[in-house]
Image: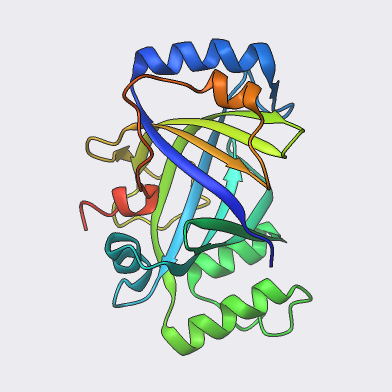
């Protein structure tokens, strides 16, 4: 399993404008983003003891969480994702789900998972059976993504983070989400073995330091 460097910074609206302009000058905008951005909807899983939430809050160095996700309201492409963290480094594994499979997950129907051809789906099945993982909450937000090939750098600007509260009706476009408290605007930077100076320089902001933040944890503030 290969891990990548991941760093997050809290920024403000003025920073967002500055970084957007700088990044457009040196990096490539994701070709799938409409007008440079897209909407992300995720459904996160946790157990009855909220292990994923508590491990994040407690700063456990080795942890994982599962989610399903789609973009811009397009349910023709849905991903199951497992995010793993190890001593500050990150790894993401993905599997494509059909609309019917995603709905089955939302409904708590697991029978189809054991014979699924993708190992990640079978792993989630095992952990749903063993640990009682279940859909917990919807997380919505807007993302502006940028790429820079040397170093395999991905820079994202995330904002308007919203929570589905207790709603897990992931595929229902009418499911209401509300602002997740005082959620910040996030600058997130991921890279492999090195971060090129041109990107490092473009991201320089006075007084901004790396901090730990979880959209899932933020969206659980109401329960």
Vertical relation: 77 (above or below) 103: above
- Residue 81, position in %: x, y? 60, 60
Count how many numbered circles sit on residues in the image. Answer: 0
Side (left or right) of 212 relative to 67? left
Between 4 and 74, which is closer to the camera in this rendering? 4
List x then y, in percent, for residue 51: 34, 73
Between 144 and 189, the one nearer to me in the picture: 189
Give the vertical position of 5 relative to 87 (above or below).
Answer: above
Against 160, residue 175 (above or below) is: below
Q: Quadrant of the N terminus?
A: bottom right
Q: Is residue 216 left or right of residue 90?
A: left
Visual colour scheme = rainbow
Q: Is residue 196 visible?
A: yes
Quarter that holds the C terminus: bottom left
Residue 219 visible here: no
Q: Quadrant of residue 205?
A: top left
Taking the spot 71% from the left edge, 29% from the top edge, the residue there is 148
Residue 159 in which image quadrant: top left
Q: What percent of the width, then of the height, locates residue 114?
A: 67, 85
Q: Residue lying furthest bottom in this view? A: 130
Front-most of residues 104 and 1? 1
Instruction: Tell me which residue sits at (68%, 47%) in the image.
Output: 193
Q: Position of residue 70 (x, y in %)?
A: 60, 46
- Residue in the picture at 45% in, 12% down: 17
Foreground pick, 145 / 196: 196
In the image, what residue occupies the spot 49% across and 37% down? 188
């Amino acid at each position: 399993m290969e891990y990548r460097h991941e760093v997050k910074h809290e920024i403000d609206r003025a920073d967002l404008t500055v970084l957007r302009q700088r990044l457009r000058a040196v990096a490539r905008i994701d070709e799938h983003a409409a007008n440079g951005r897209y909407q992300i909807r995720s459904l996160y899983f946790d157990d009855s003891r909220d292990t994923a939430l508590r491990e994040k809050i407690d700063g456990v160095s080795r942890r994982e969480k599962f989610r399903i996700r789609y973009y811009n309201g397009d349910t023709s492409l849905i991903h199951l994702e497992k995010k793993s963290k190890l001593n500050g480094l990150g790894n993401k594994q993905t599997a494509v789900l059909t609309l019917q499979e995603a709905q089955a997950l939302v409904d708590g129907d697991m029978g189809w998972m054991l014979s699924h051809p993708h190992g990640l789906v079978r792993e989630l099945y095992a952990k749903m059976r063993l640990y009682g993982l279940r859909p917990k909450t919807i997380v919505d937000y807007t993302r502006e993504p940028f790429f820079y090939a040397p170093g395999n750098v991905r820079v994202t600007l995330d904002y308007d983070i919203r929570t589905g509260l207790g709603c897990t009706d992931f595929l229902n476009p009418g499911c209401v989400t509300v602002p997740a408290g005082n959620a910040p605007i996030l600058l997130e930077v991921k890279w492999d073995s090195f971060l090129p100076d041109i990107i490092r320089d473009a991201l320089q902001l006075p007084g901004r330091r790396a901090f730990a933040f979880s959209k899932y944890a933020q969206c659980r503030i109401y329960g």
